[in-house]
Amino acid sequence: MTFDPSEAGAALRLPSDCSISSIRTIHETIQEALGRQGPLEIDCSNVNRADLTAIQLLLSTAKTGEAQGRPVVLTELSEVLRNTMQRAGFADDEMIDQNFPQKKGGS
């Protein structure tokens, strides 16, 4: 997992394994990033293993950012992560988009 605190706000890239076996490290890194000022951008393109713990952590992160008045956006959702979200009950892309703010196509 990479975290670049030098950028305005914070940017991090999730590791390929976002399952329960690595969630503690991911949580700690996200907590550090949430402690910074400005928006938080989470690159999800590298995720090739995910389970419900990753979905819970990302949803909690989005809600925490919203409560703090700072944007948290996911970029480049991998197919594995998107499928895991759907298995977790986020039935379609619209529902995923409503619960997980995303930055798409350079916007």
Image: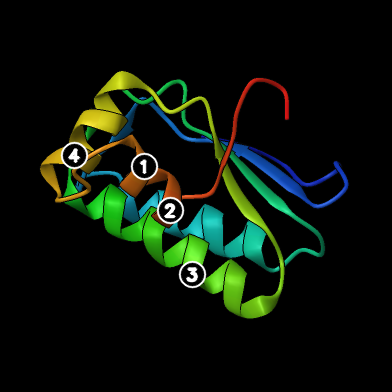
Please identify, in this view, whether the residue under mark 2 or under mark 4 is nearer the observer: 2
* Residue 94, image quadrant: top left
Q: Position of residue 24 (x, y in %)?
A: 34, 56
Disc number placed over residue 63 in the picture, else none: 3
The first of marks 2 and 4 along the sequence is 4
Tell me whether the residue at label 3 lies in contact with that at label 1, contact meaning CB atoms closer than 8 angstroms.
Answer: no
Q: Residue at (29%, 48%) from the top-left corner?
A: 54
Q: Earlier in the sequence, mark 4 or mark 3?
A: 3
Distance in Å between CA atoms under marks 3 and 2? 12 Å
**In this figure, which residue is indicated by the disc labeled 1?**
94
Q: Is residue 1 left or right of residue 67?
A: left
User: Which structural element holds mark 1?
Assistant: helix
CA separation, marks 1 and 2?
Answer: 6 Å
Question: Looking at the image, is 59 positioned above or below residue 65?
Answer: above
Residue sitting at 20 percent across and 48 percent down? 20
Task: Please state the horizontal and vertical placement of residue 96, each as a whole percent of the image.
Answer: 35, 45
